[in-house]
Amino acid sequence: MNYLNSVVDLIGNTPMIKLRHVVDQGQGLVLAKLESANPGGSVKDRIGIRMIDAAEREGKIKPGGLIIEPTSGNTGIGLVLAAIQKGYRSLFVMTDKASVERVRYLKAMGADVLIVPSAAKPSSPEYYYNTAQRLAREIPNAIMLNQYDNPANPEAHYYGTGPEIWEQTEGKITHFVAGIGTGGTISGCGRFLKEKNPDITVIAADPTGSSLKTYKDTGRLVESLPYLIEGVGQERIPGNLHFEFVDEVINVNDRDAFAMARRMAREEGIFCGGSTGMNLVVAARKAKDLKEGDVMVVIVCDTGERYLTKHHSDEWLQEKGFLESEKVTLQVVLQLRGRSGGAALIAATPEMTVREALDLMNQKGFSQLPVMEDGKSVGSLRDNRVMTAVLSDRNLLESHVREVMEPSFPVVAHTTDVSNAIRYLKDARAILIEDYGIITGILTRHDLVEFT
Ligand code: PMP
């Protein structure tokens, strides 16, 4: 029979895939190492089981113990996967920057999660790392495995990821690109690969705002600035970061990293997070110069499913100012206005009386209404026009809307960019939004004015 003993046996031996569109390969070959294919969806599955095994060997954890870890989420998922097999409980300390998907994921797997402010500095007791350390001291039979300093973290890559890459490329790898969170991936893989072949170039990607690049280049530890890419970059130097195995650090800003993560989904069909987008931007910058026979390996750190409410959402990108206004679609505006997802479109019918239609406008505070029949837009009403008519002929109040209505508002596809939709509003008060033949919403001049 062909089966595994537990989900932990699925960790590692991740595939590599040639990148065909997002990176210009120069004369060489660029391969993505798909750590998102681990059962917990990230590179961190590898260190979860390894750190727990090491703690057991060293007698640091007793049956029924509590594992506490400060994590941006992925290490938590890797740890909880392994902790479940071994009967340990887990508590993760995360910052309010962590995506809601990860927090829910951890809770769904039975872990406890404590959220602390991401604004807390390393000197503050509230800092996520300090909070986890304090709890591990105070709670009996609790242990903090400490991915930042625990040697089992880089060892997972020295004995796992690194050798896999070497074998998968038949020793032909010439360039390695990864990010730095704890430094485990880059230090473990970097050390293994350089021992095999000192000529291999190890390149680290670092978010603009993180202190790591300046530290590598100048030896000075400057204060970090905020950025939005999750799981990478640092404001201090983790014990597991061994810069001697890193040749160069390159900064990437949030916008470029997120744009690249989205291209990866759309152009390669590989769904990844922002730290992978960051790695790919560095790969793309460097790969142009690859020579014949060069092989670059880039780490795909985690799955994009973890960021569906973040950089894989148009609304979030728009809110953070990452979407150009000419690329904002009417669907996005509807969503930002809270009027998508089945909110009923308020409309008059041709058979309503004018009085009923005016009451409806009054009650909703609308100054216009579409007139709909059998799901189609057949006309429109403007309150000032109708009122003017009624004031000169009161009998009109009992007439049907059909008799007084004006032509329909323009019907525009939901995929239309705001900048292309504006022209309809020069003549019309509002536009109706159509999604596969169904009218799903209405946008007024007022709704669109801030997007122009
Ligand atoms: N990307 C993401 C999303 C991560 O969570 C992490 C780990 N914090 C990394 C990249 C970096 O990995 P490492 O800790 O091995 O440096």
Image (cartoon, rainbow, N blue to C red):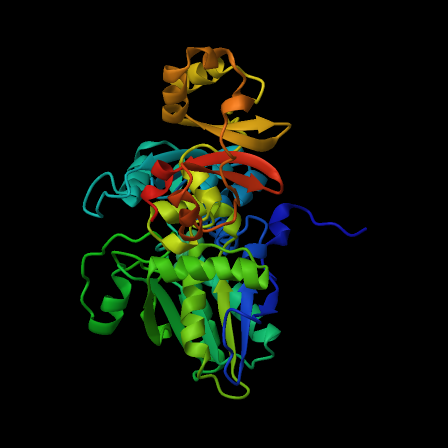
Task: From this view, report whether residue 161 is shown above or below residue 404.
Answer: below
Position of residue 346 measured from the top left corner of the image (x, y, whole percent)? 50, 24
Relative to 208, 176 lies left or right: right
**Which quadrant of the figure shows ligand 1?**
bottom left
Q: Which residue is drawn at the image coordinates 56% and 63% (left, top)? A: 267
Position of residue 110 measured from the top left corner of the image (x, y, whole percent)? 51, 32
Position of residue 361 measured from the top left corner of the image (x, y, whole percent)? 42, 20
Task: From this view, report whether residue 191 is shown above or below residue 119.
Answer: below
Q: Which residue is drawn at the image coordinates 25% and 61% (left, top)? A: 211
Position of residue 143 measured from the top left corner of the image (x, y, whole percent)? 39, 41
Task: From this view, report whether residue 79 is shown above or below residue 108.
Answer: below
The residue nearer to you, when weighing 200 against 381, is 381
Task: From this view, report whether residue 437 is shown above or below residue 188.
Answer: above
Relative to 223, 318 lies left or right: right
Extreme right residue here?
A: 1
The residue nearer to you, when weighing 141 against 216, is 216
Is any part of residue 66 visible from this angle? no
The residue nearer to you, when weighing 405 against 436, is 405
Q: Which residue is drawn at the image coordinates 54% and 58% (left, top)? A: 265
Extreme front residue here?
A: 392
Quarter occupied by residue 385: top left
Relative to 149, 40 lies left or right: right
Is any part of residue 341 visible from this angle? yes
